[in-house]
Image (cartoon, grey):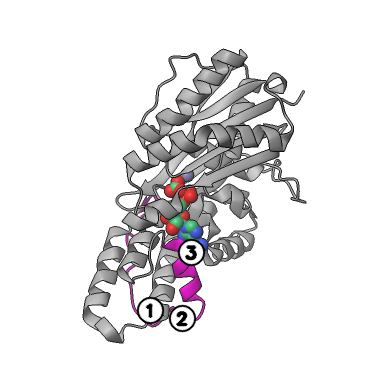
């Protein structure tokens, strides 16, 4: 029997609500705060929490309407409760607890990264090839503004952390690099666009910890871009610098990921999180995985960046296993996978 689940996400700068039934996404509404945070060049936690307060009720209302689902049709409510900005998380968790109490529906707290990790399994109305049949165990590279993790996926919700960044996340490397190149915030998409007409071999940038497959590091790259900007000044070709930076980040991610894919003899690789929107990274990993005889899966863009559909999906799996949380559910800024 398929369960119908409302998901709520407010861990960072998107307020989102979604309805999922039997892994099918019936609605996925996202209110982005990006324009507001662009003014400050990054996410301001207090401002993020206030914006969630404004958006949360209308977003939930819209998600139910678009899915044509009434509260009575729901089998439960899933909400991101860790990791993230605690003030931001509290808004979603409070809304979910209140609805759970008023509607008399079970509540499930969801780890945000579990959401990203299950995202390739969501079925969108227009997707022809759902990825529900990935063979366990498989490898996942999770890359976002706050995370860079290499994870072995052993079961629907069984994860083993294999490696992570020791400093900046991959998305931060894009964002900080973009800021140094004067391309605004967030920078990943801008770097990708400027890189299209740039030469990736123009400027030499470091690839850290080449021989250690379990640790990523991007802070040296940021320093190298700063030095490049200071040295070249007006002569700096922004397109070439963007292409060189993008190539350095993609090389660092792909080299380790593919080496772990090969040494672990995994039969599939997934790429998830906001940085999975990067076309060069997708293509590099797709080709690399196929050369090693492994399947490659990456969710559509709407499920790469933060969204509540992936949260509802995790909740659906946990509710089906009979799991529930009570109204003492807490928020946490960090939590192991
Ligand atoms: O998952 P996400 O929406 O939010 C977090 O949980 O962090 O990821 C946002 C990150 C930002 O660092 C942004 O620059 C990056 O994803 N990003 C990209 C692209 N689109 C978004 N990075 C590289 N290439 C892109 N096309
Ligand atoms: Zn995220």
Q: Residue at x 69, y 34 (%)?
A: 65
Res 72 seen here? yes
The answer to the question of whether label 2 and label 1 lie on touching residues, with beta carbons closer than 8 A, is yes
Res 41 seen here? no
Q: CA distance from mark 2 to mark 3?
A: 14 Å
Q: Position of residue 159 (x, y in %)?
A: 51, 35
Is ligand 1 less than 8 Å from the beta carbon at label 3? yes
Q: CA distance from mark 2 to mark 1?
A: 8 Å
**What residue is pinned by disc 2?**
198
Q: Which residues are magenta?
A: 187-215
**What residue is pinned by disc 1?**
238
Q: Nearer the viewer, residue 142 or 301?
A: 301
| Mark 3 residue element | helix
The residue most toward the bottom is: 235
Work out whether 112 lies above or below 259: above
**What residue is pinned by disc 3?**
189
For residue 229, what is the image quadrant?
A: bottom left
Is ligand 1 less than 8 Å from the beta carbon at label 2? no
Q: Position of residue 317 (x, y in %)?
A: 63, 27
Q: Residue at x 63, y 45 (%)?
A: 120
Q: Earlier in the sequence, mark 2 or mark 1?
A: 2
Image quarter where the N terminus lies is top right
Q: Residue at x 46, y 64 (%)?
A: 250
Q: Earlier in the sequence, mark 1 or mark 3?
A: 3
């Amino acid at each position: 029997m398929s369960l119908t689940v409302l998901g709520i996400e407010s861990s960072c700068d998107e307020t989102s609500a979604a309805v999922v039934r039997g892994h099918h996404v019936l609605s996925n509404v996202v209110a982005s705060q990006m324009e507001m945070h662009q003014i400050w060049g990054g996410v301001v936690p207090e401002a993020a929490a206030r914006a969630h307060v404004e958006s949360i009720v209308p977003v939930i209302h819209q998600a139910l309407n678009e899915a044509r689902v009434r509260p009575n049709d729901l089998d439960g409510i899933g909400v991101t409760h860790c990791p993230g900005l605690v003030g931001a998380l509290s808004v979603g968790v409070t809304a979910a607890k209140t609805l759970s109490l008023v509607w008399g529906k079970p509540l499930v707290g969801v780890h945000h990264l579990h959401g990203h990790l299950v995202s390739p399994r969501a079925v969108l109305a227009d997707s022809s090839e759902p990825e529900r049949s990935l063979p366990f165990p498989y490898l996942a590279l999770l890359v976002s503004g706050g995370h860079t993790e290499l994870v072995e996926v052993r079961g629907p919700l069984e994860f083993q952390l294999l490696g992570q960044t020791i400093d900046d996340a991959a998305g931060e490397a894009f964002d900080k690099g973009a800021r140094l190149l004067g391309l605004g915030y967030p920078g990943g998409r801008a770097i990708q666009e400027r890189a299209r007409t740039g030469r990736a071999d123009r400027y030499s940038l470091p690839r850290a910890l080449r021989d250690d497959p379990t640790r990523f590091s991007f802070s040296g790259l940021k320093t190298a871009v700063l030095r490049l900007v200071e040295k070249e000044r007006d002569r700096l070709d922004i397109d070439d610098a963007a292409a060189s930076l993008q190539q350095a980040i993609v090389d660092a991610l792909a080299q380790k990921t593919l080496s772990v894919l090969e040494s672990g003899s995994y039969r599939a690789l997934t790429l998830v999180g906001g940085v999975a929107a990067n076309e060069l990274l997708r293509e590099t990993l797709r080709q690399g995985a196929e050369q090693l005889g492994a399947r490659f899966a990456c969710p559509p863009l709407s499920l790469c960046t933060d969204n509540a559909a992936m949260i509802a999906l995790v909740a659906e799996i946990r509710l089906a296993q009979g799991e529930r949380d009570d109204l003492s559910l807490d928020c946490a800024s960090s939590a192991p996978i």
